[in-house]
Amino acid sequence: MASSNDRPLYTFQYEDPEGWGGVLVIDRLVNGCAAGGVRVTPHVDADEVRRLARGMTLKSASLGLGIGGAKVGVRTDPRAPNRMDRVKKFFEQIRFFCETNYGFGPDINTTSAEVDEVAEHLKLGFRLGVLAPDQDREAAAKRYNDGFALPYAGSTIGDMKTAIGALAAVEEAAAQIDAASPRVAIQGFGAVGATLGQLVVERGFSLVGVSDAGGAYLKGDGLDVTALRAAVDPAKRIVDRAKLPPGVEVVDNAKLLALPCDVLVLAATKDAIHADNVGAVQARAVVEAGNIGVTADALVALHGAGVPVVPDFVASAGAITMACGTIRLGFDTKDPNKLADQIGSRIRQAVKTAFEAGRERNVPLRGALLDRMAEQI
């Protein structure tokens, strides 16, 4: 049984003579394994990786996935032409952990294809193989890859998995606050935010605002998400304002956080809501679809204002739920709708449990879930 403190089990740091570095944090081992993504940013440090690894442990515990949490951060320019060489070099330092107890996936500035490339470089066979309960990594890889490749919503389950989980969190949060026709705003219109926006609209919700590094884009009667996604400049990864559909109001991106709506989704940078801007939030509920979206003091303030916050370790758990579900838990790998429902149902139930526990004890949802999981984390 894991300790209830939040000190990680193991931290490995590497500093390269060329001025870049990497960190692996294994927060907990459960059933002998842990999993978490690979983040590449210019400023990632041990504290950030520790927080993210802890979040992975919480995801698994809250959703009953049966693994521990871990994370890798590589500190380098993600635009550098040699960034993957650096990622591979760091993974050479942690090969032992990848062979024995650490399974990894993509995170900020890495893709599934790139982390597969890392696994191939290390000759691991399957980057998530340590999660296989029967240690049959070949069979586990087939289950995972079959599920990953299933067509869904114009793409694949693999590409949509995080957004599928976030959508479930948005749906349950809207139900819990009795929002019959939810108005949703999404801070962050990258890979997760744009895909989530598509799913939100397909569910019949109204997407009234999104933001990216270039600004915020609002439309009171609902954005045309297809046209908005088509307006994204693939090189700059932000919306090209010259290609915006008609009727869209362009404002400073900070104003999205103050937009009146039912559910505000945070799918961008960490600590997006903090002490200096929390008073402007007008959403009825907040969903952390990205990691560490609300600071601790802002969380207390939102609770005091009657605004529930669905924690990141639940709302952003679609990817790890899909991985553990297909590898360990017998999720369907033939029918995409069944697999999406299985991912979503785990997350919806965790959100429902959080609301029930939060109301019972009159504490923020994060604290309510942490108390319930105390013996597991």
Image: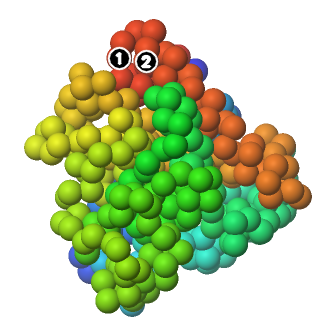
N-terminal label among 1 and 2? 2
Residue 15 in the image: x percent, y percent? 29, 67
- Which quadrant, please, contains the N terminus? top right
Callout 2: SS: helix
Quick one: 70 or 18, which is closer to the camera? 70
Label 2 neighbour load within 10 Å: few <14, some 14-19, many 20+: some
Query: Is the residue 249 above or below the residue 289 in the image?
Result: below
Whether residue 98 sits left or right of residue 273 in the image: it is right
Whether residue 361 sits left or right of residue 167 in the image: it is left
Quadrant of the rendered structure where residue 169 is?
top right
Query: Residue shown at 38%/87% (left/top)?
Result: 243
Whether residue 68 sits left or right of residue 184 in the image: it is right
Number of numbered discs overlaid on the protein picture: 2
Query: Is the residue 43 above or below the residue 271 in the image?
Result: below
Residue 313 in the image: x percent, y percent? 48, 39
Residue 77 in the image: x percent, y percent? 30, 78
Q: Which mark is residue 358?
A: 2
Query: Residue shown at 80%/58% (left/top)?
Result: 336
Tell me the amino acid under the disc marked 1: Val
Quadrant of the rendered structure where residue 360 is?
top left
Structural distance between the alpha carbons of marks 1 and 2: 5 Å
Q: Residue furthest top?
A: 360
Label 1–label 2 contact, CB within 8 A: yes
- Can residue 322 be seen in this snapshot? yes
Quick one: 302 or 73, which is closer to the camera? 302
Tell me the amino acid under the disc marked 2: Gly
Query: Is the residue 336 above or below the residue 92 in the image?
Result: above
Callout 1: SS: loop
Residue 148 in the image: x percent, y percent? 74, 64
Q: Which mark is residue 363?
A: 1
